Amino acid sequence: MQKINSDRIKVTFLGTGTSIGVPVITCDCPVCTSTNPRDKRFRTSIMIEVSGFTFVIDCGPDFRIQMLRENVTNLDAVIFTHEHRDHIAGLDDVRAFNYVLNKKIDIYGTPRVLEAIRVEFPYIFSETRYFGAPQLELHPIDEKPFKVKGIEFIPIQVLHEKLPVTGFRIGDFTYITDASFIADEELEKVMGSRVVVLNALRNSKHVSHFSVGEAVEILKKLRPEAGYLTHLSHFVGLHDEVNSRLPDFIQLAYDGLKVIV
C-alpha cells in the first residue's frame, strides 16, 4: 500500500453504496447495468491510515472482499457509527487479522452499538468461546473525544431518522454517514475540516438519509476544500453524469477512491 508522511491522513473509500449495494439484485436500470467501475458500489465503509496505524470505520457484509481488494495487511481498530447490518455484518472476518497478527482487534462504539454486536454475534462472547470466533477488545465511547493508538477521534452526533449515529472528525477530516439531521452545535464541530464526507442516498427527500441536494447545501455551508458524497443508491444516477452537475469542490465518492488529508 502507498506510504504517506506520518502527519498526513490517508482515507480509502472501501465502499460507497447503500445497504443493498449497487448494482441492485434483479435491477436493469442504467446505473445497475453500467460498465463504469465507479457505478459499482459495495456497502459503505472507509479505511484511515495515519501515523503507521490502520483504522476502519464500519465493516459491512463486503468487508472481506474490501480488505482483499486493498491488500490490507494490518488492522488496529474498527470504529462503528451505528449498529445496522450493512455497517456491522462483516465483523466475523476480522479473525483473519487475529490469526496473522496474533492480537485482539480493538472495537469502538457506543454502549448501544456494542450491545447490538453482542446480540448479533453471540458466539464471539459466549463463556465457552468457539475456537474460530474473532478475538475482540470492546471499548465504549460517548460524545466526548477519545484516542485510538494516540490518534484523537471527535464524535459528531447525528440522527438517522430517530436512531443516533456517530460521525467522526480526525484532524482535518470529517466522516458522517447515515444521517438525516445534524444539530447546529454538532455541525460546529465539523467547521474548519479540509475534507468532509456526507451521505446522500438519492435525489429525492428520504426519511432517514440526506438527499444529494440536502448534502450539497450542508457542504456549501461548511465550505471545506473538498466534499465527498457517499452511501449512494442507484437512484442517484450515473457517476460521471452526476459529478458534472455538482459544485466544483464536491464530488461523488467511489469505491477505491483515495484521499490524502
Image (spheres, rainbow, N blue to C red):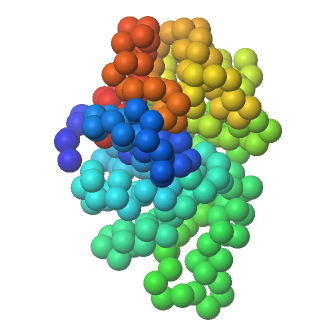
Name the residue furthest bottom.
128
User: Image point 50% across, 80% down: which residue?
Assistant: 133
The relative height of residue 109 versus residue 106 in the rendered view (above or below) is above
Name the residue furthest right.
162
Residue 106 visible in the picture: no
Q: Is residue 90 left or right of residue 123?
A: left
Residue 136 visible in the picture: yes
What x and y, as percent, mark residue 155? Answer: 62, 36
What x and y, as percent, mark residue 188? Answer: 65, 18
User: Image point 32% across, 30% down: which residue?
Assistant: 259
The relative height of residue 121 versus residue 7 in the rendered view (above or below) is below
The relative height of residue 180 versus residue 19 in the rendered view (above or below) is above
What x and y, as percent, mark residue 62? Answer: 43, 56
Q: Is residue 61 left or right of residue 124?
A: left
The relative height of residue 18 versus residue 196 in the rendered view (above or below) is below
Quarter of the rendering occupied by the C terminus: top left
| Front one among 32 and 210 | 32
| Front one among 22 and 257 | 22
| Front one among 125 and 232 | 232
User: Image point 70% across, 45% down: which residue?
Assistant: 142
What x and y, as percent, mark residue 81? Answer: 60, 45
Q: Is residue 196 left or right of residue 33?
A: right
Q: Is residue 49 left or right of residue 231?
A: left
Residue 219 occupies quadrant: top right
User: Image point 48% across, 51% down: which residue?
Assistant: 26
Name the residue furthest left.
2
Q: How many marks?
A: 0
